[in-house]
Structures are given as C-alpha cells and as structure tokens.
Image (tube, rainbow, N blue to C red):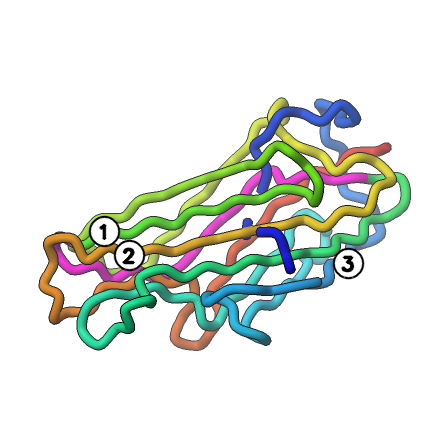
Amino acid sequence: MLASLAGVATALSATASTTPTPPPQNSMVIDVVSANGSGCPLGTAAVTVSPDSKAFTVSYSEFTAQVGADAAATAFRKNCQLGLNVNVPQGYTYAIARVDYRGFAHLEPGAKATQSSVYYFQGEPNTGKTKRSFAGPLDGDWQRTDTFGVGSLSFLPCGEKRYLNINTELRVNAGRSDKRKASFLTMDSTDGNLDTVYHVAWKRC
C-alpha cells in the first residue's frame, strides 16, 4: 500500500538546482498516508515538522527486533514502510539532505544486528539505500547519521505531487551468542518515543 521506509542519495534530478535555498516562510505540512509493517502497527508511528521547516521527525513506539530468550521466531526482523504526503509551499520543492537515526541496542557477545533504510519519491527509478552494522557485546543508546552532499541530492520535480516513501528495517542475528539470552535492536524507548529526524534542503522552482 505504501511503497517503502526512510532520505535520498541518488543522482541529481534534472530540475534540481545545485544550491539549496533557505526554507520558505510558510511551513510544510506532512500527512502519513500509509504506515505498514511489523515495526509500526497501526497508530504507532507519528510525524512532526520543525517550526523552521528544516526537518521533520518520525517517532515510533513499537519498533524492536529481537532474538533469544522467549522471542518469537519472526521477531528477528522488523520493518516499517511509510508513505508521506509532503505539502510544500507554492514555488518550492525539497530534498532530504541528512537523516539522523536513534535507538537502543542490547547485543550479547557474538550477536550482530543491522539497521537499513531505503527512501525515494513515488515513481522515481533511483533509490537511496543506507545500512549500518552493530556487533555484541553492546548495551546502550545508538545514533547514526547519513549526510548527502548537494551534488547528490534528489529533489522532488517542481509542481508534481508524489509521496515520499521510506522503508526502514531492523534485523538481529543471534550468531554465536547464548540463545537463552535476549539480544535486541530498537528504534523506540521505554516511554515510547525515540525519533528519526530527516533534514530538508529547499529549492525554488
């Protein structure tokens, strides 16, 4: 229903300028058109926009992959596919310039985990992909940042309405770890709010 989760490191669009401009005075409005996947059951993903329109945040409350102990056989992989309808002020377009991922990891010695993301505009053949790896022993908060240079920004074609599709996956492998002990990777917190922040570059049409 939605095409896929989480930023864009693709070839520069033919309509894109190589010099992003300051954000417009009018704020952008983002609607979650669809949220699909084991990592974001209905009602567990939310989007907010920063006051300066330079970033937006996706918050998750049930995004955890785990193995070992009493974990279900399918719990080793969790994903969330978001379809976002980004309404931008007239005369502007945008690209994703940087993505900050945050979460918590507990990996027993010998266990491994990955966090990967794919993000693109609806109908675009080019796809941006990122992947991060973790290895146990590990126990604590984690943060990863993907930054895309101006020359590789992929701007939404001016005047077109296309959903921004973001697909994020968490995966944990028990490896040589003690299978009686739990290992997990999460993009949520005990209070239900750890965020993924997407920083926006603007361009005048």
Q: What stretch is highlighted in magenta?
A: 93-110
The secondary element bearing badge 2 is classed as strand
Q: Which mark is residue 172?
A: 2
The quadrant holding residue 181 is: bottom left
Residue occupying the point 21% across, 59% down:
107
Earlier sequence position, callout 1 versus callout 3: 3
Residue occupying the point 41% across, 61% down:
78
Mark 1, residues whose alpha carbon is within 10 Å: few (<14), some, or many (≥20)? many
User: Considering depth in this image, is 45 or 189 the residue closer to the camera?
Assistant: 45
Residue 11 left/right relative to 190 = right
The quadrant holding residue 111 is: bottom left
Mark 2, residues whose alpha carbon is within 10 Å: few (<14), some, or many (≥20)? many
Residue 112 left/right relative to 171 = left
Q: Is residue 48 above or below residue 130?
A: below
Point out the image quarter for the C terminus. Answer: top right
Q: Is residue 82 above or below residue 132?
A: below
The percent position of residue 95, horizontal first and vertical second, equals: 68, 38
Residue denoted by label 3: 29
Disc 2 marks which amino acid?
Answer: Val
Q: Which mark is residue 80?
A: none
Say if mark 2 contacts mark 1, CB within 8 Å: yes
Earlier sequence position, callout 2 versus callout 1: 1
Residue denoted by label 1: 112
Residue 178 left/right relative to 79 = left
Could you tell me how far apart the alpha carbons at marks 2 and 1 are, in whole angstroms? 6 Å
Say if mark 1 contacts mark 3, CB within 8 Å: no
User: Considering depth in this image, is 191 or 5 the residue closer to the camera?
Assistant: 5
The secondary element bearing badge 1 is classed as strand
Earlier sequence position, callout 3 versus callout 2: 3
Q: Does the magenta stretch include residue 126?
A: no
The percent position of residue 140, horizontal first and vertical second, equals: 28, 60
Disc 1 marks which amino acid?
Answer: Lys
